Image: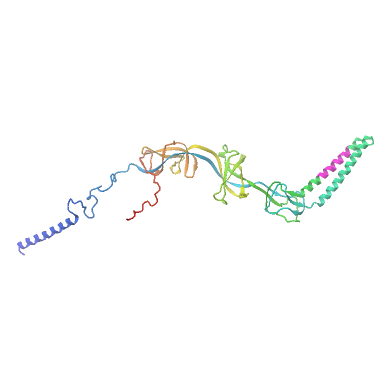
Amino acid sequence: MTLRAAVVAVSIVATVLAGCGSKSEEGGGKPGDGKAPAGGPPGGGKPGAGGPPGAGGPPKGLPVKAAPVEVAAIDLDVQAVGTLLADESVTIRPEIDGRVTELHFQEGQQVAKGTRLVSLDQAELKAQLAQSEAQVRTESQRYERARELLAQKFVSEEAVDLARNNLARAEAARREVEARLDKATLVAPFSGTLGLRSISPSAYVRKGDDIVRLESISAIKVNFRIPETYAARVRPGQGLAIRLDAYPGETFTGQVYAVEPVVDERTRTILLRGRVQNSGLKLKPGMFVRVNLAMEKRENAIVIPEPAVWPQGQQTFVFKAVDGKAVLTKIDIGMRRPGKVEVSSGLVPGDVVVTEGQIKLKDGAPIMVLPSQPPAAPGAGAPPAKG
């Protein structure tokens, strides 16, 4: 190839390449027409163009959630577990030996005070009573005769005294038989409900054998223990409420009426006894119950959410939000309730405490309190309907 031909070929190649570059510029848009090149950043590739104002700026502080302290009335309650007892309870037992001639009750029956329950054989006792009454009559006649003879000076005063003593012994013997005869009939000592009997008619029972239990449960007692630290605050007349697994959702109320005067040395607890009205007879002796004892009520107590409490060793702190900074503040804790804590010192009404985000905070660190998020309205976030 000649030199002239080589120069012509190079010129042709340069022309073709120039044409391809021109087409690429046409595909990316003309300069100044406002169109960004395909695949380029918004705003023509300039940093920060097209974004919200300040989007790339540093945050003002650590984001946290906070809540103001609350001022409310709070009750001091003590929780304990207890056992129900019958208001009155007794096992009917005979005081003498004898054969059961009749049972006057049905198992589970409600009876009034004085109702006859069991009769024992009385034939032998009635015979003994007749004998003792005859002996009383005899000794009474002897005594009267001795007095008449003393008036006539036929006997001494000693003979009259002896007759008087014999009459007294006969009357005492009669009263003894009458008492044993009374014990042959067993009656209800108070109104209540009978349990299951342990004997059958015509059974021979001995003194002290169990026959049937009698329980008074129109009102019912509850025994429970509380720590000795509450000894100075507990007193008769305080209200209590009990709950049972057998009746979920129901609460039965009553009052403390007796406090054990000594502290149990082993458990360091005080035994209390309350009485609860048992309308409907739902409560049964022996049931396990949860007791809530009302000790006192505090008005205008300062209360904060429980997550705001920040324990450090043996002390308790919170982070207060003050002028955009987290201020570590020591507090004293009072009573606790589900999700709430009473603050007895360290905070005042109007303070705001951090409830979330404390783990990264230090005393004096800048913070940014996030606004509380109200619940979303129904249908919020759904795409608008097309027309």
Image position of 202 (left or right of 268): right
Mainly helix, strand or loop, the magenta region? Answer: helix
Image position of 183 (left or right of 321): right
Residue appearing at x 79%, y 48% in the figure: 181
Foreground: 291 or 27? 27
Residue at the extreme bottom of the image, as rendered? 1
Residue at the extreme front of the image, as rendered? 387
Image position of 264 (left or right of 360): right
Q: Is any part of residue 12 visible from this angle?
A: yes
Colour convention: rainbow
Foreground: 273 or 27? 27
Percent of width and height locating residue 120: 77, 52
From which residue to which does the magenta span run?
A: 161-175
Q: Is any part of residue 264 visible from this angle?
A: no
Residue appearing at x 54%, y 42% in the figure: 78
Image position of 272 (left or right of 49): right
Residue appearing at x 59%, y 49% in the figure: 288
**Magenta region includes residue 69:** no
Quarter of the picture containing the C terminus is: bottom left
Quarter of the picture containing the N terminus is: bottom left
The picture quadrant where one finds residue 386 is bottom left
Q: Is residue 383 above or below residue 369?
A: below
The picture quadrant where one finds residue 235 is top right
> What is the count of numbered marks?
0
Foreground: 325 or 121? 121
Percent of width and height locating residue 371: 37, 44
